Image (cartoon, grey):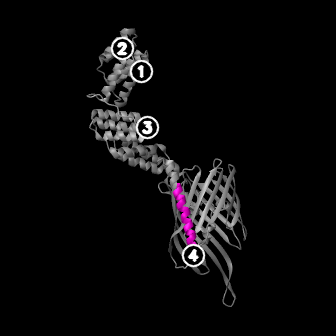
């Protein structure tokens, strides 16, 4: 089945499952009553996301991913920090601080703090006498991880510590979130999912249980990524109905963005500036309680982890090539797999792993010094160089040497199936190897005056046996017959280097270089004598 069709079906099924789950939660929630503990975690993080109406679960690929969707941490390549401060109403302050750091083989790690604080409340006794003041403080500290598991899928998780202090009373607990960002077959579309409060471990007992919350979102990019539209659906199992969030971001200039958002509670507007590694964002929310302002600043710093990952990947790739050359195909497969872990977008590594998986299942190793193993190693190296035709020719040569080699027979068939080659296998003349057959055919073409075909057959021999002296001599003779003395001498000298005992060829080279070469038919007759 076509890869795009598979991804489309997967996307459709995931969408149906997610929407069905939200609807189920919605139906279930209508039978449930009670408050909504942890509601302060719905205030958001980062003025960019707030300016887009909090429709951010599918595009949270910055330091705010620790809040919106930990899967968004996966593609980050540099350290990043962000701070948000918002003055709400009646002296209430909301702050968010996050730091993320990509690591070589663990994806990206992050840590963040969310704080909602209200102070200065009057504290009175049973006689309504003022006896002091108290505060209401809610805090969430989060450790996050995000990792790319496929070129179209990122996964992430949060562990959060929650604490709520009201005057002298404190509740605290640990909770776990899970997130995913999926890139379906539809170009420029991303789908995000964040399941919050999947698991809660209470430190201090409380009657208030954190509700399971599902946030499902999609984002689509237009105009070469200058325009982003985003929609989130949020379901809290303790609250009837489904909340929606919609946002738009447009970059009219390379450094400047304007934003608009809307949800069930407020309308938002915002703008942002980006210069080198620095970002500044502002959002204004129009709420039934009034207008609130949110400011955030972000910075990226440190070297890109991408360069370090590519260096490690390259090292494993070179080790894989060395293992291939020695015939350890199973070990090479493991090494190239390691390379892909660090550089999953490298097409060369992906190609090698796909082909090595096929080869190692049939021929795990080919490490002896005998001719068959040497040829198999050379065939595999040609396959890694994407020379499928050369690969098959060399493997056919192995079969001509040993027709009972079952592994090579299976390997030829598997490669042809993998590459979509449906032509039948050529029949070999009995009692002749493939090299013998091609040299014989080359000689026949030479006698017939078909020098270009004689050259081709002899060149095919050099694919099978790179040091075949007769093939070099035959190519040289054909070029000489074609009138190309320079190339003829080049191939003849290579033949003589491989076979210094060929005195006839040595003598003829000396005549040609002394410009004593025979002319016309006399010269060709001598060449035919060389070929016999």
Residue 8 appears at what percent x and percent y? 53, 52
Rounded to the nearest angstrom, the CA distance separating label 4 from label 1 is: 86 Å
Mark 4 vs mark 2, foreground winner is 4
- Which residue bears the numbered disc 4? 32
- Which residue bears the numbered disc 3? 386
Asked if labels 2 and 4 touch by Cβ distance under 8 angstroms, the answer is no
Asked if labels 2 and 3 touch by Cβ distance under 8 angstroms, the answer is no
Q: Is residue 98 above or below residue 506?
A: below
Taking the image as shown, residue 231 lies to the left or right of residue 424, namely right
Which residues make up the magenta segment? 11-32
As drawn, the label of residue 452 is 1
The question of residue 439 being in magenta is answered with: no
State the residue in front, 42 or 419. 419
Of labels 2 and 1, earlier in sequence is 1
Asked if labels 1 and 2 touch by Cβ distance under 8 angstroms, the answer is no
Q: Residues within 10 Å of mark 4 (few under 14, many from 20)?
A: few
Of labels 4 and 1, earlier in sequence is 4
Where does the C terminus fall, quadrant-wise? top left
The question of residue 19 being in magenta is answered with: yes
Rounded to the nearest angstrom, the CA distance separating label 3 from label 4 is: 62 Å
Residue 247 appears at what percent x and percent y? 66, 58
Mark 3: secondary structure: loop
Mark 4 vs mark 1, foreground winner is 4
Residue 511 in view in this figure: yes
Of labels 3 and 2, earlier in sequence is 3
Of labels 3 and 4, earlier in sequence is 4
Of labels 4 and 2, earlier in sequence is 4
Rounded to the nearest angstrom, the CA distance separating label 3 from label 1 is: 25 Å
Q: Main secondary structure of the magenta part?
A: helix
């Amino acid at each position: 089945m076509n890869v795009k069709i598979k991804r489309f079906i997967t996307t459709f099924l995931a969408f149906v499952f997610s929407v069905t789950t939200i609807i189920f939660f919605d139906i279930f929630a209508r039978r449930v009553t009670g408050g909504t503990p942890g509601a302060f975690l719905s205030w958001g993080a980062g003025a960019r996301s707030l300016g887009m109406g909090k429709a951010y679960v599918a595009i949270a690929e910055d330091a705010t991913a620790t809040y919106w969707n930990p899967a968004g941490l996966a593609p980050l390549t540099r350290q990043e920090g962000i701070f948000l401060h918002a003055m709400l109403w009646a002296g209430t302050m909301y702050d968010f601080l996050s730091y993320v750091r990509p690591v070589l083989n663990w994806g990206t790690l992050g840590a963040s703090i969310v704080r909602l604080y209200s102070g200065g409340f009057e504290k009175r006794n049973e006689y309504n006498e003022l006896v002091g003041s108290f505060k209401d403080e809610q805090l969430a500290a989060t450790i996050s991880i995000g990792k790319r598991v496929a070129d179209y899928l990122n996964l992430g998780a949060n562990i959060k510590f929650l604490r709520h202090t009201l005057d002298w009373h404190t509740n605290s607990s640990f909770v776990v979130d899970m997130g995913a960002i999926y890139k379906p077959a539809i170009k420029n579309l991303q789908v995000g999912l964040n399941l919050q409060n999947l698991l809660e471990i209470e430190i201090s007992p409380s009657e208030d249980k954190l509700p399971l919350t599902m946030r499902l979102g999609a984002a689509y990019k237009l105009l070469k990524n200058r325009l982003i539209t985003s929609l989130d659906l949020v379901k809290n199992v303790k609250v009837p109905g489904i909340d929606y969030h919609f946002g738009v971001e447009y970059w009219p200039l390379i450094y400047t963005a304007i934003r608009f958002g809307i949800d069930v509670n407020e309308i938002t507007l915002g703008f942002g500036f980006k210069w080198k590694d620095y970002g500044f964002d502002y959002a204004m929310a129009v709420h039934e309680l009034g207008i609130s302002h949110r400011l955030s600043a972000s910075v990226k710093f440190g070297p890109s982890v991408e360069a370090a990952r590519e260096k490690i990947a390259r090292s494993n790739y070179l080790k894989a090539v060395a293992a291939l050359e020695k015939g350890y195909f199973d070990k090479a497969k493991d090494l190239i797999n390691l390379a892909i872990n660090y550089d999953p977008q490298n097409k060369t590594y992906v190609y090698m792993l796909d082909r090595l998986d096929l080869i190692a299942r049939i021929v795990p190793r080919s490490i002896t010094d005998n001719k068959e193993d040497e040829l198999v190693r050379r065939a595999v190296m040609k396959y890694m160089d994407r020379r499928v035709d050369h690969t098959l020719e060399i493997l056919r040569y192995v079969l001509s040497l040993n027709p009972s080699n079952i592994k090579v027979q299976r390997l030829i068939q598997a490669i042809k199936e993998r590459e979509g080659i449906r032509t039948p296998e050529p029949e070999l003349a009995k009692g002749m190897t493939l090299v013998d057959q091609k040299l014989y055919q080359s000689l026949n073409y030479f006698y017939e005056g078909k020098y270009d075909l004689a050259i081709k057959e002899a060149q095919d021999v050099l694919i099978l046996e790179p040091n075949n002296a007769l093939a070099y001599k035959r190519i040289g003779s054909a070029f000489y017959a074609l009138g190309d003395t320079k190339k003829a001498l080049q191939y003849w000298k290579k033949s003589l280097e491989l076979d210094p005992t060929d005195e006839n060829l040595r003598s003829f080279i000396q005549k040609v270089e002394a410009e004593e070469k025979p002319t016309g038919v006399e010269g060709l007759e001598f060449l035919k004598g060389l070929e016999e």
